Amino acid sequence: MIIQTYLFHMSNYIQIKTTVGELFAIPITASTKPEIPEDLLKGWQNIANIVAEVTNVPAALIMRLHPKDIEVYVTSNTPGNPYSLGAKEQLSLGLYCEETIGRGDMTYIHDALDHEYWHNNPDIRFGMTSYLGLPIRWPDGEFFGTICILDGEPIELSGPLGELLRSCQSEIERSLSDLTEKARFKALAEEQEISLLEAHHSIKNHLNMLANIIQVKMINEQDEQYDHNATLEDILKRISIISEVHDIVSLSKSKFVNVNDLIKSISEMLILSSTDKEIKLQMKLHEVHVCQRVLFLSGVLVSELIVNSIKHAFDKCPCPTISISVTSRCPDRFSILYKDNGCGITESHVSNSNKIGNRIINSIPKQFDGYVQSSFVDGVEYNFAMNKRCFSCSACISATYQSR
C-alpha cells in the first residue's frame, strides 16, 4: 500500500497526516544539535559516491530535513545527476523522502508513474521515477533526513541492495552519535569550568565575609575581656563550613543539589563541636533542590543561626533545643524555619545593623527575592522564604533557557 503524506510545519517537529487519516508528529533536528563538521561531510560524500557507483544509478543523496523544506545535503558526483548541492524543495508536495520519513523505514517505489499518488511529485520533472530510501535519525530519535538513490529506470530491489543502503544508514547514524557525544563532553567540560569559576567566586565571597568578621573582632580586641581562643574557634568553624559546602557541591552530579544534605551536615557538625553544651537537634527536612549559589548561602545562613544560638542562647536553658525544618509548597520557592528555646534576643540587638550576624540573616534572603519573619518569644524563631534559583549562575541560566 502506498501512503501519501502531508506535512504541516510546527516549531521543532513536523506533523504528518496520511491518506488513511493517521496523524502523528515527526521530531526534526533541534537547534541545539551540533553542526556537521567538514571532515564528516567528506566522509558522507564518499558514501554517496560509492553507493551511486555500486548501484549504477545517476543519483545517490543524503537529504537534510528542515521545518519547511528538505535540502540536498550531499549529492553523488555521478554523470546524469540532476540534483545540485544545497537545492531545496518545499515540504507537503508529496516528495519521496517525505514518505520515507513518514514511514520511519525503507521506502521503495518501483515506478512512480504507475501510481497516481506520485504524479505531482517534484522529482518526476527530473525524470527520477524510481526511488529507494531510508530515514536518518539522531541518537535521540529526531530525524536528520534520509539517504536515498534515484533513477529514471526502475530500480530492481534485491537483498544485497537493501543491505548496502542499510549499512550506509547505520554508518551515518553512528557518525551522528559520535558527533553528539563529542559535543556533550565539550559542553560538560565548559560547564565544569564555569562551575569551578563560580565555586572560586563563592569561596572568595565567604572569605571576604570572614575578613569582615575578623576586622570586627580586632576592634573588640581592645576590650580586656576579649577571648582570643573563642575568636579563632569561630573562624575555624566558618572555614569548616566552607569546606563542607564545597564537598557536597563537588560530589553532586546535578546542577541542582538537595539543600537538606548540607543543612543536616552543617547542623550536626556545629552541634557536635559544641563540647560544653548538650544540645538537642530536631530536624524536619523535605527534599528541596536548589542551585549551587542558593545552596552555598543557605549553608552560611543556617550556620550563622546555629553559631549564634550556641554562643548566646543557652546559658540558662536546662534543655537546649534547636529545631530546623525545610519545606517547599510551590515549584520555585522554599522555606527554612529555624527555632531555638533559648533566652531570646533584645530589641536593641535585633535593630543593631552593625552586627555581622544581623547583616547575614537579613541580606541573604533578599538576594533570592525572599524575606525573613522573626519572633523572639520563648527563644528565637526565624522563617525564611526565598527562590530555589539565583537566575545568575550557569545552571540557572541554562535551565531558564531550556524551559522556554
Image (cartoon, rainbow, N blue to C red):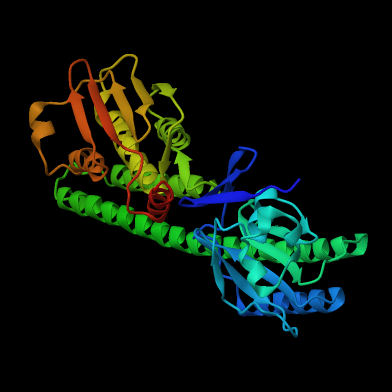
In the depicted view, which residue is nearer to us: 387 or 235? 387
Q: Is residue 261 visible?
A: yes
* 88 relative to 246, above or below: below
Classify residue 185 as left or right of residue 213.
right
The residue that appears at 85% across and 73% down in the rendered structure is 55
Which residue is at the front of the view, 160 or 7?
Answer: 7
Q: Quadrant of residue 350?
A: top left
314 sits to left or right of 87: left
Locate residue 51, reporting x and y percent: 81, 74
Left or right of 136 on screen, residue 383: left
Where residue 266 appears, as percent x and y from the top left, is 42, 36
Q: Residue at x 77, y 79 (%)?
A: 49
Q: Position of residue 184 (x, y in %)?
A: 58, 60
Toward the right, the furthest residue is: 159
Q: Nearer the viewer, residue 140 or 282?
A: 140
Q: Position of residue 67 (x, y in %)?
A: 50, 58
273 to 400, vertically: above or below? above
Q: In the picture shown, does residue 161 fall above or below 54?
A: above
Relative to the observer, which residue lies in front, 202 or 26? 26
For residue 239, say whether it is visible.
no
Query: What quarter of the picture does the N terminus occupy?
Result: top right
Residue drawn 24% across the image and 27% down it: 382
> Residue 112's quadrant in the figure?
bottom right
- Label count reads 0
